[in-house]
Amino acid sequence: MRLTTCLFIFILSQPVFANPWEQANEPSPLKPESIGSYANGCLSGAEPLPLKGKGYQVIRPQRARYYGHPATIEFIQQVAKDVQARGIPSLLIADVAMPRGGRFSSGHSSHQTGLDIDIWLRLADQALSASDLKAPSYISMVDLKNYRLKSKNWTEQHFELIKLSAEKEQVARIFVHPVIKETLCKQETAQDRSWLRKVRPWWGHHYHMHVRLKCPEGEKHCINQALPPKGDGCGAELASWKPKVIPKKEKVVKSETKPKKKKIKQKPEQCLLVLNS
């Protein structure tokens, strides 16, 4: 057998890692810094969130997505303490970021800079067992078929949790399902409704809230998202999310245009140093 053929067979037999960010199993030794944008960046000097702390537990720890910017870790621990002080059951912390940030092969397009946090709306009255933590079940707050709140699942504690989080100065946005946003708008009776501006409607967030923090002060390579529209977002903007009812007899004509291929985003050059450090 010729040498070139042997080499070709050897290459084919080797594992191919399409995403090097998922292969990094420890943080970079560089100084803590969030680099790039939430959906196209990386994280240096990450800290792991302890798997259990006062007022919270980390779920699905086997995925190793519990790394974040030190400011993010501090934020999670503080919110959990605030929640416990108010008598709210423990939080279940889901995805934050990978050890060096970067993109996931599937699922999230964000969570790349260690400033995004998924917090489940299932509140834990008791500590979850190891098996439950590995494969937990979620509790939806929304009747998705009928586009309405599941009143039996929603409590005043959910309102308190989201409001408490949104009022934190370092929070840029909180994504929730449009029905949850609508519920928050109705429940808020205080004169100050400014925190509602940060709570943004987004599909898929019916069983968890996605908290996004601002770039830490002084980190010049971190890109903040533009500010949300002015106002509390409870009017026409929120109403526009409600699905239009399509008559049963009406046929939906599919577009014949071919979907455009997504361009691969070029990461900031600093991310190459993070990946190879």
Image (spheres, rainbow, N blue to C red):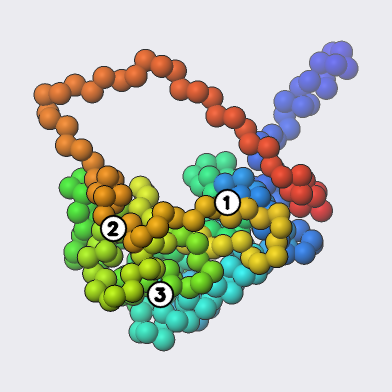
Which of pointers 3 and 2 indicates the residue nearer the eye? Answer: 2
Label 1 or label 2, whichever lies nearer to me, is 2
Query: How many neighbours does mark 2 have within 10 angstroms: few (below 14), some (14-19), or many (20 or more)?
Result: some
Q: Residues within 10 Å of mark 3 (few under 14, many from 20)?
A: some
Give SS at disc 2. loop
Circle nearer the N terminus (1, 2): 1
Which of the labelled discs sits on residue 38, or is there none? 1
Q: Please name the residue shown 70% across and 61% down the image.
A: 219
> Viewed as shown, does residue 50 lie left or right of 157?
right
Q: Amino acid at mark 2?
A: Cys
**Residue 24, percent from left and from top:** 70, 51
Residue sitting nearer the eye, 139 or 179: 179
Local packing at callout 1 (Cα closer than 10 Å; few below 14, some 14-19, many 20+) is many
Residue, disc 2: 234
For the point 77% across and 27% down, the residue is 11
Q: Which of the two labelled residues, at mark 3 and mark 1, occupies the earlier sequence position?
A: 1
Residue 164 shows which numbered tag? 3
Would you identify the image quadrant in which residue 126 lies?
A: bottom left
Residue 15 can be seen in this image: yes
- The secondary element bearing badge 3 is classed as helix
Along the viewing direction, whichever of 48 and 133 lies nearer the viewer: 48
The picture places residue 67, in percent across and down from the top left corner, at: 62, 62
Q: Is residue 22 above or below residue 124?
A: above
What is the three-letter code of the residue carrying label 1? Tyr
Asked if marks 3 and 2 touch (Cβ < 8 Å), the reply is no
Name the image quarter holding the N terminus.
top right
Q: Residue furthest bottom?
A: 85
What's the distance in space between the residues labelled 3 and 2, CA to CA? Answer: 18 Å
Q: Under tag 1, what secondary structure?
A: loop
